[in-house]
Image (spheres, rainbow, N blue to C red):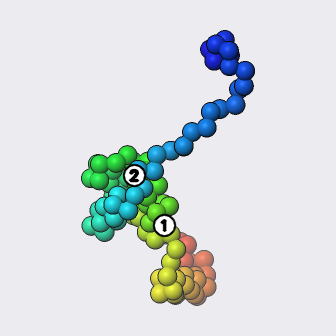
Amino acid sequence: MNATKNGREKTVDASHSGASTLAMDECHVEQVKSVLECTYSISCMAVATEVRISPGSVCLILINGLRKQKVCAKWIPHVLNDGQRAVRVLLATTHLQHWRNEDNAFFITF
């Protein structure tokens, strides 16, 4: 409202560069990657403290830069390679066969 009182006629936002990309440089990406290699079960806040950038920037690096996602409190690759995919299919098939052999007993707990 103050802008229109001071003579501004348009209500369109002024152009701006957007979010800062300073933390998304190759140096920070490599630092986050090296911290993650030491321990996969680490929070964005802990990585941010270690690398000295914001937790939001760490999450952007992990998700967009390194293509990781948090599953069961561990950062894992978002895209599986052929070997990882084969292991997952084998485990799922084994569980499915066990379920078929055991029928409903597979779900019964004591």
Q: Please give the residue where the numbered disc 1 appears in the rendered image.
A: 67
> At label 2, which amino acid type do we have?
Ala
Q: Please give the residue where the numbered disc 2 appears in the rendered image.
A: 23
Q: Is residue 49 above or below residue 109?
A: above
Q: Is residue 110 visible?
A: no
Determine the image quadrant of residue 66: bottom left
- Front-most of residues 58 and 40: 58
> At label 1, which amino acid type do we have?
Arg
Q: What residue is drawn where x is 29% and y is 66%? A: 34
Q: Give the quadrant of the N terminus.
A: top right
Indicate left or right for 87 with 96 as reference.
Answer: left
Label 2: how many Cα within 10 Å (few below 14, some 14–19, many 20+): some
Determine the image quadrant of residue 7: top right
Q: Earlier in the sequence, mark 1 or mark 2?
A: 2
Expressed as whole percent of the image width and height from the top left, the position of residue 59 reads 44, 54
Determine the image quadrant of residue 3: top right
